[in-house]
């Protein structure tokens, strides 16, 4: 028993441990909330019973924890970027300072001010003649795996790996394809991923088909704002302003009135960001950091997209 516990304690420090749990979370549909026959035919098109829903939720959380650990291990989390930054959830878990039991109970998870979904925009492209064949093969593979009108159960990122015989060893694939765009010079995947971008998975796809790719990812709860396209050839945003709450003292009324119901604003450069706030809100600053200091983080937050890879 002691050996088993020691093995589990060691294994639970690795993301692969939680990936395996995510894949094997058991569930049995009891048919208590809909016709069992309908469920067996196509469960994805019907409201799932409580057993299935709870198992799916557990599976997503195991995958989320794996993604957090993977990101921390590769030093792409928030606490690895700057000294003095608060430890990320994975660092707290590895140090024994985070009780993950609350993480797996829906009522407790509502207290976490962290989003569940990382929005990934991935652009694949070819720069050399030798890459063109692979580019067309990838385009065909994407078209085959994710046709227009796909339902949720068919939109898993892992599907393109499975259908093309690509190894998924060591990869976290807790992601769904929300939309695709197939153009002459680029293939764009819009993915909803668990907590952090599936960078290793996209890199694996690019290597398999012999093409290049750029990634833009955003997950506000874990402070992820990534854009690898440093030249802005495909993915141009460099800054984001998020208007969260109008101050009661009316100090930002002009800005919030101009914004209307919009809360998210993207800018291709620091100059564009500063100009927008100067013209729309009458707020003058000489840098993004100075602008944030003026605004304060309780009502408006400024985020810079960086390339951590």
Image: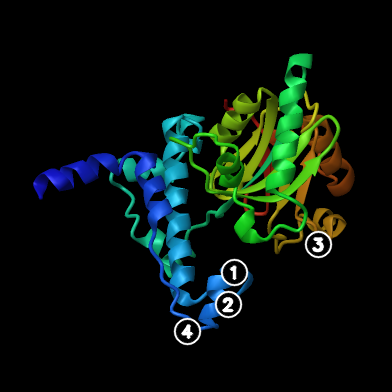
How far apart in space, not on screen, are marks 3 and 1 (Cα)?
38 Å
- Residue under circle 2? 38
Residue at horizontal 32 percent and vertical 54 percent from the top: 99
* x, y percent for residue 223: 57, 43
Outermost residue on the left side: it is: 2
Q: Are marks 4 and 2 in contact (CB under 8 Å)?
A: no
- Residue under circle 3? 261
Mark positioned earlier in the residue sequence (3 or 1): 1
Dot 3 lies on which element?
loop
How far apart in space, not on screen, are marks 1 and 4 (Cα)?
16 Å
The mark found on residue 42 in the picture is 1
How far apart in space, not on screen, are marks 1 and 2 (Cα)?
6 Å
Question: Tag 3: Cα neighbours inside 10 Å, few (<14), some, or many (≥20)?
Answer: few
Residue at horizontal 79 percent and vertical 31 percent from the top: 234
Q: Is residue 172 left or right of residue 190?
A: left
Question: Tag 4: Cα neighbours inside 10 Å, few (<14), some, or many (≥20)?
Answer: few
Q: Are marks 1 and 2 in contact (CB under 8 Å)?
A: yes
* Mark in the foreground, 1 or 4: 1
């Amino acid at each position: 028993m002691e050996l088993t516990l020691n093995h589990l304690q060691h294994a639970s420090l690795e993301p692969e441990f939680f990936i395996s749990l995510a894949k094997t979370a058991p569930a049995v549909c009891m048919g208590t909330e809909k016709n069992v026959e309908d469920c067996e035919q196509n469960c994805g098109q019907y409201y799932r019973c409580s057993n299935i829903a709870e198992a799916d939720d557990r599976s997503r959380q195991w995958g989320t924890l794996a993604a957090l650990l993977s990101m921390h291990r590769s030093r792409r989390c928030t606490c690895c970027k700057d000294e003095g930054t608060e430890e990320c959830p994975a660092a707290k878990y590895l140090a024994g300072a985070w009780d993950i039991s609350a993480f797996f109970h829906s009522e407790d998870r509502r207290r976490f001010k962290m989003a569940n979904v990382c929005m990934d925009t991935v652009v694949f492209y070819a720069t050399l003649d030798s890459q063109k064949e692979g580019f067309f093969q990838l385009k065909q593979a994407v078209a085959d795996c994710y046709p227009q009108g796909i339902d949720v159960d068919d939109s898993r990122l892992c599907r393109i790996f499975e259908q093309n015989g690509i190894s998924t060893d060591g990869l976290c694939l807790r992601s769904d394809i929300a939309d695709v765009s197939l153009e002459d010079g680029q293939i764009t995947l819009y993915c909803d991923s668990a907590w952090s971008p599936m960078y290793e998975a996209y890199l694996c796809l690019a290597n398999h088909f012999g093409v290049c790719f750029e990634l833009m990812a955003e997950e506000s709860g874990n402070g992820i704002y990534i854009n690898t396209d440093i030249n802005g050839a495909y993915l141009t945003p460099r800054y984001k302003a998020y208007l969260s709450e109008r101050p009661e003292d009316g100090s930002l009324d002009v800005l919030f009135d101009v914004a209307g119901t919009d809360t998210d604003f993207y800018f291709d450069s620091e100059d564009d960001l500063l100009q927008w706030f100067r013209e729309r809100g009458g707020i003058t600053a000489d840098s993004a950091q100075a602008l944030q200091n003026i605004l304060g983080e309780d009502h408006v937050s400024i985020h810079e997209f960086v390339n951590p890879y």
